Image (cartoon, helix red, strand yellow):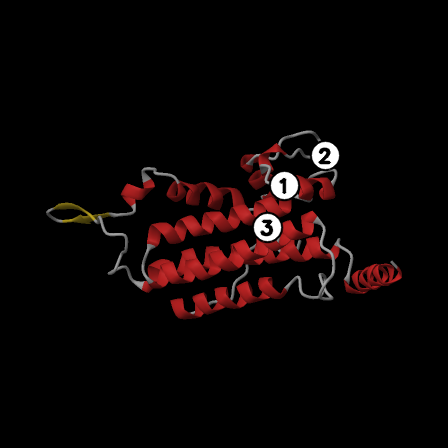
Amino acid sequence: MIETKGIVLDDLLDLVGRLDRIRAIALDIERAPDKTYSPLGSFLAPVEWYSLAAVTKSTSNAHAFCTLVEGRNTIAAIATVRMQIEAAMRLYGLTLVDDVEAAGAHLMAGNKFGQLKSREGVRLADKVLHEALSFEYAWVTEAYEDTSAFVHLDGENIKSKLVHLEMGAFFNLSGVDAKRPEAAYFHLADTFFVALRMTKDILLDFLRTRPQAQERAERLAAFRRELGEK
């Protein structure tokens, strides 16, 4: 893992720069498997397909988050942060199992992640995952729990829409916060970027454990020779 207890970010002046940074790292994540899973026509193990699901989840979340923030859809944007943390948690969870190939087959067969067990025999529920990941990324549990309140129909969905005025409280029933200043999204955008950066680091660690391009090319060539001999 590259990032442990500390979070270091370049200081940016505006929201546009923050969203551009998110789009750039999402593109890094999209391109990350290119060399490991090449050449074209190579066979992928079920767990490798699962890693690609983590890639598409991340790039989809990044696109959605930027769109939601630009549209001032605060509640849905916060929920997207939580989805991204969860994607990273589950990719990280593959490092906790005894047999990663069997875990991949289990997941790609449509079974639930929470049915998997760690090497110590503990079921990999979300609480177990985010607490384990917090040993590497200290901010994860707090961020996961805070953003979960916006995934579920919880009190935070009310508090975030209340505006206190001299004549009393005003409750915004609209799905957007049109007058919310861009600076109010800086911390949220930075949190989402850090979640993506964490995902990228976990993905790169995973890809290093997989057969690399040369080995895959040799396997593919052997398979094609075998087909030709039949």
> Which marked residue is nearer to the observer: mark 1 or mark 2?
1
Viewer-proximal residue among 138 and 153: 153
The amino acid type of the residue labelled 2 equals: Arg
Is residue 108 visible in the rendered image? The answer is yes
- Write down the residue under mark 1: 109
- Write down the residue under mark 3: 5
Residue at the (67%, 65%) spot, across then down? 34
- Write down the residue under mark 2: 119
The amino acid type of the residue labelled 3 equals: Lys
Q: Are marks 3 and 2 in contact (CB under 8 Å)?
A: no
Circle 2 sits in a helix, a strand or a loop, which is it? loop
196 relative to 67 in the view: left or right:
right
Residue at the (59%, 62%) spot, across then down? 29
Circle 1 sits in a helix, a strand or a loop, which is it? loop
Q: Are marks 1 and 3 in contact (CB under 8 Å)?
A: no
Residue lying at the far right of the rendered structure? 229
88 relative to 158 in the view: left or right:
right
Quarter of the rendering containing residue 183 = bottom left
Residue at the (40%, 43%) spot, across then down? 151
